[in-house]
Amino acid sequence: MSRPMRFSFLIAAALAAVSCGERNGGGASSEAAAPLTIEEQGRRAFSACAICHSVKDPTEPGYASLVGPSLFGVVGAPSAHLSGYDYSRAMREANLVWDDATLDAFLQNPQQIVPRTRMAFAGEPNVERRQAIIAFLKTLN
């Protein structure tokens, strides 16, 4: 098949697919997709955190620690609260309670809130993403 003929074939196939999709109810929906809840937005944003942090209950059988501690039940808990996790000295001595304001400040700039923490995360500058992550963390209990 010559190049012009292949190109024409590809265009025709694409147009047919679009046409079939429109006739058969495919393609863009006339109904708008439901907006994500703040917790769902947070769950999605948390995927970057999940590289180091589990959301599993560490008291459950089969729990395996990752690089960072599990964040299950972290909201309202004191810093360095999980027995068995080797927190940095800085985190053990921080004497924080992970409430909304503290979590927000820590997620924005961990090193400023707990200098010498081992957490390698530079911080999340976007306030909406931080609030969504906190909303997701509140569901983990």
Image: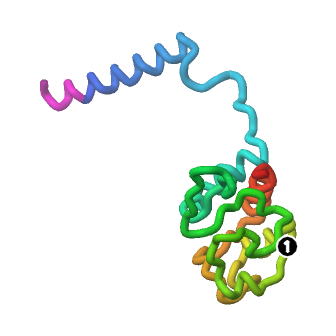
Horizontal and vertical percent position of residue 108: 73, 73
Residues 5 and 129: in front is 129
Query: In the visual, does 14 lie left or right of 103?
Result: left
Tell me which residue sits at (66%, 62%) in the image. Answer: 70
The colour mode here is rainbow
Horizontal and vertical percent position of residue 40: 72, 45
Residues 54 and 21: in front is 54
Q: In which quarter of the image is residue 94?
A: bottom right
Judge whether 120 appears above or below 24 on screen. below
The answer to if 67 sits in the magenta stretch is no
Judge whether 18 appears above or below 109 on screen. above
Q: Which residue reaches farthest front?
A: 61
Label 1, secondary structure: give it: loop
* Image quadrant occupied by the N terminus: top left
Horizontal and vertical percent position of residue 60: 66, 51
Q: Examine the residues drawn in magenta and state their main secondary structure.
A: helix
Judge whether 16 appears above or below 131 on screen. above
Residues in magenta, as a range: 1-6
Report which residue position mark 1 lands on. Answer: 97
Residues 14 and 112: in front is 112
Q: Residues within 10 Å of mark 1 (few under 14, many from 20)?
A: some
Tell me which residue sits at (62%, 50%) in the image. Answer: 61
Tell me which residue sits at (68%, 50%) in the image. Answer: 43
